[in-house]
Amino acid sequence: MARIVAVGGGMVGLATALMLARDGHDVTVLERDADEVPASPGEAWDAWHRPGVAQFRHGHYLMPAGSHILAEFLPEAQQALVRAGAISHDLVAVMPPFITDRAPRPEDARFVTVCARRPVLDYALAAAADGSVEVRRGVAVTELVTGREAARGVPHVTGVRTSTGEQLAADLVIDAAGRASALPRWLAALGTRPPAGQSEDWGFSYYTRFFRSPTGTMPPFLAGTVTPFDCYSIGTLPADAGTWSVVIIVSSHDQALKELRHPDKWSALLKACPLHAHWLDGEPITEVLPMSGNIARYRRVVVDGAPLVTGLIAVGDSMCATNPSLGRGMTTGLMQALGTAEVARAHLGDPVAFARAHDQMIEDRVMPWYWNSVGMDRARKDQVDAVIEGRPTPAHDGQQGSALGSLMAAMPYDADLFRAFIELIAMLALPEEILARPGVSDRVSEIASEREPSLPPGPSRSDVLQLLA
């Protein structure tokens, strides 16, 4: 049994801790936010103060791939979510009206997920962790403790010092502190190189508002969970206890659309979208909540096969963060939690082998989704910028980008291509896997050659500017 310290008590930190605890390890979670877990899901939404999580009261969506990880490997967390009021959402149910083949398929259950607001998600994970792992709230890590090197010239972390003055020994320290992770500062203090990686700011801003149904009934989906228009997108995210959120996503550089921070202007745009206006038919339970500055970023602490440090790994947004518009953060975090537990079973006794195997697991399982997200964000940014600047929309970049664009054009008219596309949305399969299947590319080409990509009904940019004037 190993002693493990996880830094960060959010969803990914707790999920990682739970998976390791199930394998018999002694896990302590240090959470810098001091508030204790509220007594109920309602109190979690109303009163849980989590300043360390900037997006705590913004829209969240757990992809089916993430929901399946919970159901199979952390069933107690999935059950806690259901008890907290989370609802099931079936992506197949949002099938476009042009598709005549509405017959179910045997594999359709894989497109179902559970949905809840972020405070309720964290509440449920905390309830599942109670009694399995020790969670110390209001405790931050001030520095790492090192000991005898496992590899010559490579610092080896053997514990942490906390804001309470305590020193905790650990066979492994896990950084799950999210976007505000101190990982670069910690490595600098150890005298090692900065982590490798890159970061990009695609410049998206989010204007979110939450609603509650007077009857407990969720509004019907007349479009997908995220619908792109010419210079904005609209996300409609089901949640728990008869609540949902609507988010309008725009370019951070589009000064005119900053007016969406005002509830009347925000509502005016939504009312002008025929497939989305009915999402206003509820009681607003928040004001319009703006958010921006969420860069895409990844870090590696293994470079060219050589660890920069041993005894320390990063998971979740500490390691790999994407823009929220695709809703992939929680699911990639759960992929990392599961992978970390698997790597620990094989290599925890060998710090160097563990570091290398964990890095390779991230490269194999998570980074393909990161790069896919970056490519989709880049393409969307180019489209929006072109509309703002009044120039032609750029063509898809590269063979895969063109093929994916053709799939998007074809999927509203074919039941199987629609399912293939939502495999990507649900994070069940990457585009290259989908497009390589026998017959898929031919069917896509056949339909896409007859159909031009079209925008859903809603105001154009010039109309939006008049609405917001």
Image (tube, grey):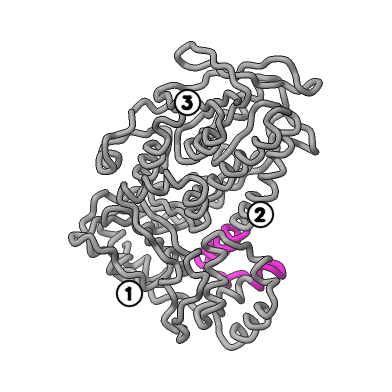
Q: Residue at x 39, y 36 (%)?
A: 126
For numbered disc 2, what is the local secondary structure?
Answer: helix
Say which mark, if any, is on residue 274.
Answer: 1
- What range is drawn magenta here? 375-403
Viewer-proximal residue, 147 or 339? 339
Kind of residue at disc 3: Leu
Mark with earlier residue (1, 3)? 3
Q: Quadrant where the N terminus lies? A: top right
Q: Position of residue 245 (x, y in %)?
A: 33, 56
Using a 10 Å C-alpha cutoff, classify the residue at mark 1 as few (fewer than 14 neighbours), some (14 to 19) or many (20 or more).
some
124 lies left or right of 252: left
Viewer-proximal residue, 282 or 433? 433
Above or below 108: residue 362: above
Q: Quadrant where the C terminus lies? A: bottom left
For numbered disc 1, what is the local secondary structure?
Answer: loop
Mark with earlier residue (1, 2)? 1
Q: Are marks 2 and 3 in contact (CB under 8 Å)?
A: no
Q: Residue at x 68, y 80 (%)?
A: 439
Q: CA distance from mark 1 to mark 2?
A: 35 Å
Say which mark, if any, is on residue 30.
Answer: 3
Q: CA distance from mark 1 to mark 3?
A: 47 Å
Using a 10 Å C-alpha cutoff, classify the residue at mark 2 as few (fewer than 14 neighbours), some (14 to 19) or many (20 or more).
few
Above or below 329: residue 134: above
Query: Which residue is labeled 2 in the image?
Result: 368
For numbered disc 3, what is the local secondary structure?
Answer: strand
